[in-house]
Image (cartoon, rainbow, N blue to C red):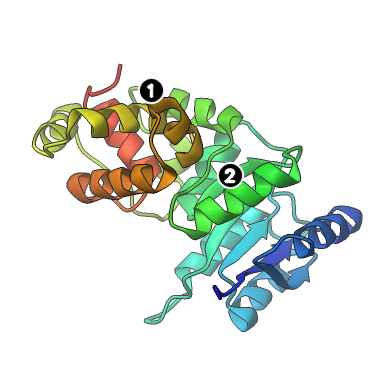
Amino acid sequence: MEKPIRIAIVEDHELTRIGLEAALKRRDGIEVVGDAANGYQGLNLLKTTKPDLAIVDIGLPDIDGIEMVRLFRENQGDNPIPTKILMLTMHKNEDSVMAAFAAGADAYCMKDINIDKLEEAIRSTHQGNPWIDPTIASIVLQQLRKNSPPSVLEKQNTTQIKGLDEDYADIVGSAGLTDREIDILKLIVGGCSNGEIATQLFVTVGTVKTHVRHILNKLCVDDRTHAAVLALRGGLIE
């Protein structure tokens, strides 16, 4: 029997926090290990419970969720906690979205997402396939298409993919992506989940996951967001 996905919730709105916890507890294979009402409590919660995934609200009352995630990622020491971070928020402006990913978030969902989609996002993120709300995906792509790096990223102390567009083109061109991998990469850029890609290409989700893993390995990146950066900046996708 597979171990349940251990989840921590950091949300200041009590009714939202209680409702979210109650809904997730009714889902098979998910265990809520704790909750917190502000950023500093959240940091302590993640340190003590070491959850598989944390759902973090951006609008926390002391430090915001983005700062909380940044502090969590920066203060891991030699033995980092492999906790995935899913931002759950009402904010969909460019600054909030890009700052969340720059701080170390793995997924970004809107608060009006239904519980079925949230569960899909949780499972996808837990498996190492970051989930981006389709509304958010369009914002990410608009920002990536700009000629200059996003100013919000310049303010974050984080590792970024850097280089000229020619450098990106060289990386993409030498990666040896197959036609099917390019098709899948285009759908990733379009914000499709593994399930949606499988439906469009008439293959299984397992097949899509294998292709995604190959794409990431060939491009030498750790996640789908960076793969999308390379595809766009390298001219693979207009």
Where residue 122 appears, as percent x and y from the top left, is 60, 54
- Residue 111 to residue 137: above or below: below
Q: Quadrant of the C terminus?
A: top left
Q: Amino acid at mark 2?
A: Tyr
Badge 2 crowding class, 10 Å Cα cut-off, few under 14, some 14 to 19, many 20 or more, is: many
Q: Name the secondary structure under disc 1.
A: loop
Where residue 26 appears, as percent x and y from the top left, is 79, 61
The residue under the point 61% across, 71% down is 4
Mark 2 in CB contact with mark 1 (< 8 angstroms) = no
Q: Nearer the viewer, mark 2 or mark 1?
A: 2
Q: Amino acid at mark 1?
A: Lys
> Can residue 171 be seen here?
yes
Which residue position holds label 2? Answer: 108
Which label was assigned to residue 146? 1
Horizontal side, residue 141 vs residue 99: left or right: left
Where residue 13 appears, as percent x and y from the top left, is 86, 55
- Residue 62 to residue 202: above or below: below
Horizontal side, residue 61 vs residue 84: left or right: right
- Residue 180 to residue 89: above or below: above
Identify the image quadrant of residue 55.
bottom right
In whole angstroms, how far apart are the C-alphas of marks 2 and 1? 21 Å
Horizontal side, residue 38 vs residue 86: left or right: right
Identify the image quadrant of residue 93.
top right
Of residues 219 and 152, the one drawn nearer to the viewer in this rendering: 219
Q: Quadrant of the N terminus?
A: bottom right
Identify the image quadrant of residue 9.
bottom right
The residue under the point 52% across, 44% down is 131
Q: Name the secondary structure under disc 2.
A: strand
Badge 1 crowding class, 10 Å Cα cut-off, few under 14, some 14 to 19, many 20 or more, is: few
